[in-house]
Image (spheres, rainbow, N blue to C red):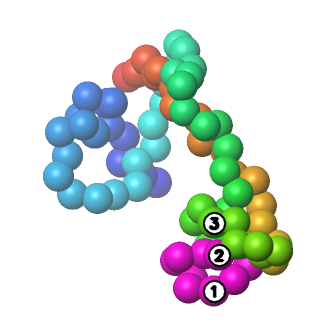
Amino acid sequence: MHPKKKIDDLLELVEDGIFAVYGVVTGIIGGEEWWYLACKCHKAVIPDSVAYYCNSCVKHIFQVVPRYVWFILLESML
């Protein structure tokens, strides 16, 4: 089980970790792209003529997957 933390506690952490965050979504922040085309490594790809290029894998990719990014407002439940 991952340690429970309040959202405010996570903002103060200096170490990396995996935490379970429980809360209520109170809003969605707009203004950013909500999706991008990605390589199987989950990194964004760059269109390159008939293929895509992944800077992370350092190779051309022919099969991409849309990945979604949501920026949300979350109210802590703890």
As drawn, is 1 to the left or to the right of 64?
A: left
Please, which residue is most extreme toward the top here?
A: 26
Q: Position of residue 33 (x, y in %)?
A: 61, 37
Element type where label 3 sits in the image: loop
- Which quadrant of the structure image shows residue 54? bottom right
Element type where label 1 sits in the image: strand
| Amino acid residing under circle 3 | Val
Q: Position of residue 42 (x, y in %)?
A: 62, 65
Residue 6, can we see it? yes
Which residue corresponds to mark 2? 53
Q: Position of residue 78 (x, y in %)?
A: 37, 22
Q: Against 36, is 9 above or below?
A: above
| Amino acid residing under circle 1 | Lys
Q: Earlier in the sequence, mark 3 or mark 2?
A: 3
Q: Earlier in the sequence, mark 1 or mark 3?
A: 3
Which residue corresponds to mark 3? 45
Q: Residue 59: which numbered mark, if any?
A: 1
Q: Which residues are magenta?
A: 53-61
